Image (spheres, helix red, strand yellow):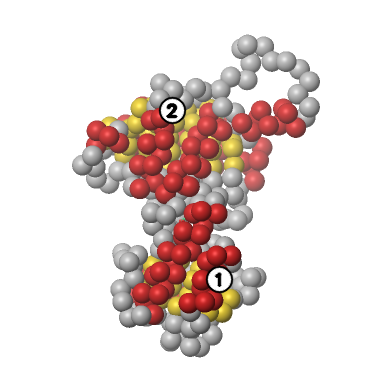
């Protein structure tokens, strides 16, 4: 009745088996295949559910519950056309994702990858006071693009580091003063920020950050992406790093994951993590339980709390 198409933390898996008639899909399943009679599928953002995958689902399927806040991996129109509901897991991964944004900001600003490489190579030579200097965060301006739950949580943490916040968002927020200063114009934010953090949902393949946007950023600025890789033109970011126009980048997400543009490996100022924003036990358990709550509501004939609509 419930197909579990993604490995889950033990406590969540146990609950799923106790509470539902649940079956686990083979771990190496690349294309979503569900047996006839399956009513709900639980999966993650690692699994692409395109129109062809939706078309191949049995008629019994009524719900796809994704263990992620993002749902850009699911063709919502195809699901809607077949009457399949989709749920996500908002809120519970906000803190973990904001923490990894701070990790990337700090690592890129303080040259963590280069320092790590120096230690890996045995150090050996003391640095002069004018060598290997990074960017100090206190007193600097953080520009947040996308001031939703995660953007707000990044702002809160960055303020504790002494940063001033600018934000660009579809709408100005009512609690503006607490969050930072609203920039209606993205270009204005890019020109004023020392660090730019993308925190908006990924939409399609059209990059938001192209050569023109990187050129608008301050010389020596830091760029961080914990949102979606498709928001960035990789050629443009790599060129901005290689020319020294940008001081560094922190990237948790990449176009075409788990493949990624391996030219980033040649950029010592790029600090890279493999899409680990929500990867803490607390958060992954909370995401799993939230997804199961949605499944439980659906199977009981109620409206799931986290119904995704477009
Ligand atoms: C999300 O939940 O969307 C995160 O990016 C993990 O996939």
Going by the image, does 197 lie left or right of 9? Answer: left
Q: Is mark 1 within 8 Å of ligand 1?
A: no
Going by the image, does 30 lie left or right of 137? Answer: right
Residue 299 lies, in percent from the top left, at 39, 80
Q: Which residue is mark 1?
A: 14
Figure label count: 2
Q: Which residue is mark 2?
A: 161
Residue at the image position 72 percent from the left and 27 percent from the top? 118
Residue 137 lies, in percent from the top left, at 46, 25
Tell me if residue 116 comes above or below residue 13 in the rendering. Answer: above
From the viewer's perspective, is the residue at label 2 or at label 1 nearer? 1
Tell me if residue 182 comes above or below residue 9 in the rendering. Answer: above
Res. 257 in view: yes
Q: On the rendered image, what quadrant is the C terminus found in? A: bottom left
First in sequence: mark 2 or mark 1?
A: 1
Spatial CA span between label 2 and label 1: 40 Å
């Amino acid at each position: 009745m419930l197909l579990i198409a993604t490995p889950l933390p033990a406590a969540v898996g146990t609950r799923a088996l106790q509470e539902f008639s649940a079956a686990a899909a083979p771990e190496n399943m690349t294309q979503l295949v569900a047996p006839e009679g399956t009513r709900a599928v639980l999966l993650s953002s690692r699994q692409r559910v395109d129109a062809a995958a939706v078309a191949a689902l049995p008629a019994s399927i009524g719900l796809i519950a994704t263990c992620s806040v993002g749902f850009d991996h699911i063709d919502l129109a195809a699901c809607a056309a077949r009457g399949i509901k989709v749920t996500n897991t908002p809120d519970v991964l906000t803190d973990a994702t904001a923490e990894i944004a701070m990790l990337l900001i700090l690592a890129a600003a303080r040259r963590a990858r280069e320092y790590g490489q120096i230690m890996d190579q045995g150090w050996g030579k003391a640095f002069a006071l004018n060598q290997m200097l990074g960017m100090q965060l206190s007193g600097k301006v953080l520009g947040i693009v996308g001031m939703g739950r995660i953007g707000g949580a990044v702002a809160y943490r960055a303020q504790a580091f002494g940063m001033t916040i600018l934000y660009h968002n579809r709408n100005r927020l009512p609690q503006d003063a607490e969050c930072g200063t609203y920039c209606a114009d993205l270009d204005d934010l890019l020109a004023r920020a020392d660090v730019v953090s993308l925190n908006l949902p990924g939409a399609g393949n059209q990059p938001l950050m192209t050569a023109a946007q990187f050129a608008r950023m301050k010389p020596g600025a830091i760029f961080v992406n914990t949102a979606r890789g498709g928001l960035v033109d990789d050629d443009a970011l790599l060129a901005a790093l290689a020319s020294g126009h940008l001081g560094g980048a922190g990237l948790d997400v990449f176009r075409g994951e788990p493949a990624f543009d391996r030219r980033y490996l040649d950029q010592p100022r790029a600090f890279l993590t493999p899409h680990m924003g929500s990867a803490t036990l607390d958060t992954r358990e909370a995401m799993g339980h939230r997804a199961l709550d949605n499944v439980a509501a659906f199977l009981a004939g109620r409206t799931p709390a986290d119904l995704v609509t477009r």
